[in-house]
Image (cartoon, rainbow, N blue to C red):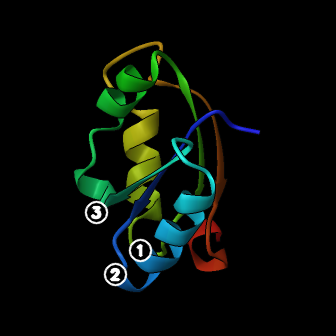
Amino acid sequence: GARRVVAIERDERCLEALAEVSNHYPGRLHVIPGDALKTDFAALAGEAGGPVKIVANLPYNIGTELLIRWLTGAEWPPFYASMTLMFQREVAE
């Protein structure tokens, strides 16, 4: 499994459940309450020590914007090694 997972969650209703999961895996799950659109992903990758793997179930209203930001960043190579993303059908179509 992953050595460390960072979850960015805006929905307050999910934070309690994520905290419970985090308690079962001390030091391996770091939950950041907040908006993914305001997150500095390159800084998070830097804290992790290098390129990271992005695995995300992206919300309908921000999925496209995040993908475009990640693909068109000024830095190359990018802060990520790979991306595995899930979009809602309406976004993919």
Disc number lying in front (1 or 3):
1
Q: Amino acid at mark 2?
A: Glu
Residue at 52% across, 77% down: 17
Where in the figure is residue 29, as x and y percent of width and height? 53, 49
Distance (Cα) linking label 1 and label 2: 5 Å
Instruction: Judge by depth and name the residue closer to the eye, 81 or 26.
Output: 26
Which residue in the structure is indicated by mark 1? 15
Residue 35 in view of the camera: yes
Specify the quadrant of the image occupied by residue 89: bottom right
* Quarter occupied by residue 8: bottom left
Does the CB distance between marks 2 and 3 fall below 8 Å?
Answer: no
Residue 35 bears which disc, if any? 3
The 10 Å Cα crowd at callout 1, few under 14, some 14 to 19, many 20 or more, is some
Q: CA distance from mark 2 to mark 3?
A: 11 Å
What is the x, y in percent for residue 79?
Answer: 44, 23
In the displayed structure, 1 sits above or below 91; it is above
Quadrant that contains the N terminus: top right
Question: Of 5 and 89, which appears nearest the observer?
Answer: 5
Instruction: Kindly give the residue lying farthest to the left in the view shown.
Output: 38
